[in-house]
Image (cartoon, grey):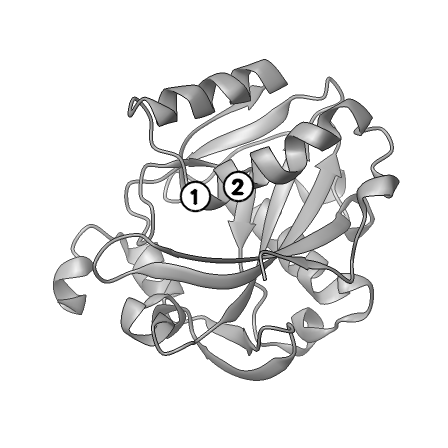
Amino acid sequence: MFQASKTHLNELQIKRLEEILIVIDKQDQIIGADTKRNCHLMENINKGLLHRVFSVVLFNTQNQLLVQQRADAKYTFPGHFTDSCSSHPLYVPEELEEEDAVGVRRAALRRLQAELGIPQDQISIKDITFITRKYQKCQSDAVWGDHEIGYLLLVRKDLTLNPDPREVRSYSYMSQEDVQGLLDREARGAEKITRWFRSMVEDFLLPWWPYLEDVSPFVEPDKIYGL
């Protein structure tokens, strides 16, 4: 079944399945490492395998949110609309550093440049704000799923984008009303949205949206929602 489930993947996605991710417990304490493939197989998720991820919400200075549609070659939730950029810190020293979530923020910077094509001279780790964490467990299909504690990161800046088509099918900046419309269409079965994006919008982004110029009241680095 695993081999059959890989038939839609492109070469990049197959290669990235061998990345080594950070395995954690439900208190977000590091307990080991495993491949991206193993971390996302439902057979392992059902045994409790849990790993660390991040989700970046990228706003421009007009307070529009960058929403992307995942490439059809993604192994989980292909073709679904989702947050600006989500991925994994790797089990490497620079991305394991935990003070001020600096390791996760370095990982986010790496992926913002690689996935969205943001030039290195336009964004730095200082532009990435760690807000809070959220636990999630969900199934994509019979083989793949997510079991994660995700770090929610915020960027508010005007940036040049050149997304990698192997990762991103489409993208656009959306107002709060546009995003609500997307969620409404998904509820009617007219669109596909990742579960974590709907949860993120409803639980976090809608309350934040009027306060994007100062989100400090919403910063809760010690909390893990969803547990």
Q: Which mark is residue 199?
A: 2
Q: Quadrant of the N terminus?
A: bottom left
Percent across and percent down for residue 9 are 25, 53
Q: Residue at x 66, y 69 (%)?
A: 95
Residue type of the residue flagged with mark 1: Arg
Residue type of the residue flagged with mark 2: Ser
219 vs 86, nearest the viewer: 219
Residue 159 visible in the shown view: no
Which corner quadrant of the image does residue 133 belong to?
A: bottom right
110 vs 74, nearest the viewer: 74
Percent across and percent down for residue 126 are 83, 49
Tell me: 155 left or right of 160.
Answer: right
206 vs 130, nearest the viewer: 206
Circle 1 crowding by C-alpha within 10 Å: few under 14, some 14–19, many from 20? some
Which corner quadrant of the image does residue 40 belong to?
A: bottom left
Percent across and percent down for residue 225 are 64, 55
101 vs 184, nearest the viewer: 184
Mark 2 secondary-structure assignment: helix
Tell me: 220 left or right of 180.
Answer: right
Q: Residue at x 81, y 27 (%)?
A: 211
From the image, tell me which residue sits under label 1. Answer: 195
Q: Residue at x 80, y 42 (%)?
A: 218
